[in-house]
Image: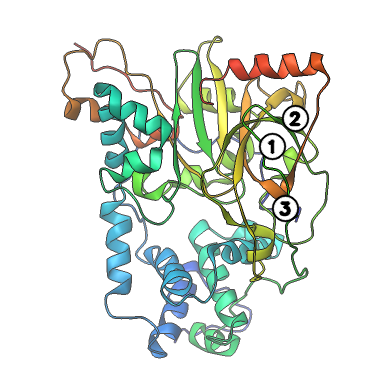
Amino acid sequence: MNQHTSNQQATPDERARALHKVLLDKKLIPDGYIESFTKLMEHDWDPSNGARVVARAWVDPAYRKLLLEDGTAACAQFGYTGPQGEYIVALENTPTLQNVIVCSLCSCTNWPVLGLPPEWYKSFEYRARLVREGRTVLRELGEDLPDDVIVQVWDTTAETRYLVLPVRPEGTGHMSEEELAGLVTKDVLIGVARPVAPRA
Amino acid sequence: MDGIHDLGGMQGFGRVAHTNNSLSYKPVFHEDWEHLAYSLLFLAADGMKVFSVDELRHAIERMNARHYFGSPYYDRIVIGTATLLVEYGVITQKELDEMLGTRFELARPYFSQGRQTRAGRQPFEVGDTVRVRDEFVPGHIRMPGYVRGRHGVVLHRTKEKWPFPDSIGHGKEALHEPTYHVRFNARELWGEAADDGFVVVDLFEGYLDKVELPAARKDAAGLAQRENAHV
């Protein structure tokens, strides 16, 4: 038990551990539950999953068609399914359209495909500003889009979970599917960044 | 509810603390308690089936605004989860307080009973112009305030249906309905005090009404729709 005087503030970690301990003492936590859920979050749900999906769509037209028609089925082919990934829609960028994902109300994200949302994605700044100042926010983050590129922001306000399908960069014709996946970062999957070909 | 959580379009915020592709995102958690937030939430919501994730969102929205803004993300998940476990009688406030050694501040109690959706309506089709209901709801709702009363065009109707948030978010039986990806023009939402571009919001059917447009407006809506690659 922590020792606090009545006017002392507890810290977030103390609160989390207190709730954990209360549930443990009541024997409400099955053996291994937290460990296995933590493994999902730390290892299984990873942006490299989404990168594999994108790279496959870049090299396989039939897969690309499936991904755009039924993102859930296309991701399930790789085994990328589960909580916060039950209805997946892929957002197709074009040379003149940049899709970007946010959750203004909380922090909903496509966990199995993108991994857990990063701190900045959950920040009040990103949640407040992206829907209204998409182009400006992207520029500040490092993606200065030409004027002819339309910014289309997707606010994750219900059960659909998204991933952005970027345009395959010029000059990547020689690259293997695995090498292509290496160009697709978490920021690319969220849509704040566009992939770039490695320098020759 | 028009709570502090409904941040979309709010002004007064500075830069997002990030530079693209500067992070490896490993390790996933930065402090050794953070994994407990989602783990305990899923234990309660999925393992024990005490409450739904919609209720968790509502519980976090019920936090006092200062409390919400002063708490980091995973702390809000812990506070929301603890609030519902106390409300459902799985644990008690006293147990939490004694374990913490001080008051464990929870979210505020319910101040609305929620509501049911409007059953038996015609679904909307892709290309339809819809209007978000111009209404103020005291309880849980997943309609960001910035689209209230606004017109948009339907890009997608989901093939699946989900329980209406305004009901299930209050622990009530809920009718299931599809959601719609509705596209709005950012300049129509905020005028010139916005960047050009579009915002697509995923809205439950019950939040929407169909708009019958005169022929001229319909042409304009159709034109806007063709500019969009994802339909």
User: SS at mark 3?
Assistant: loop
Measuring 66% from the left and 14% from the top, which residue is drawn there? Answer: B223
Q: Earlier in the sequence, mark 1 or mark 3?
A: 1
Residue bearing the label numbered 1: B9
Tell me: B193 left or right of A174: right
* Amino acid at circle 1: Gly
Q: For residue B68, say whether it is visible.
A: yes
Asked if residue A41 is positioned above or below residue A166 in the image, the reply reads below
* Amino acid at circle 2: Leu
* Amino acid at circle 3: Gly
Q: Do labels 2 and 1 share a chain?
A: yes
Closest to the observer: B205 or A164? B205
How far apart are the alpha carbons under marks 1 and 3? 33 Å
Q: Residue B120 carries which label?
A: 3
Where residue B143 appears, as percent x and y from the top left, is: 69, 47
Residue bearing the label numbered 2: B189
Q: Do labels 1 and 3 share a chain?
A: yes
How far apart are the alpha carbons under marks 2 and 1? 9 Å
Measuring 32% from the left and 33% from the top, which residue is drawn there? Answer: A185
Q: What's the chain of the residue with tag 2? A: B
Asked if residue B61 is positioned above or below residue B197 in the image, the reply reads below
Where does the N terminus of chain B fall, quadrant-wise? bottom right
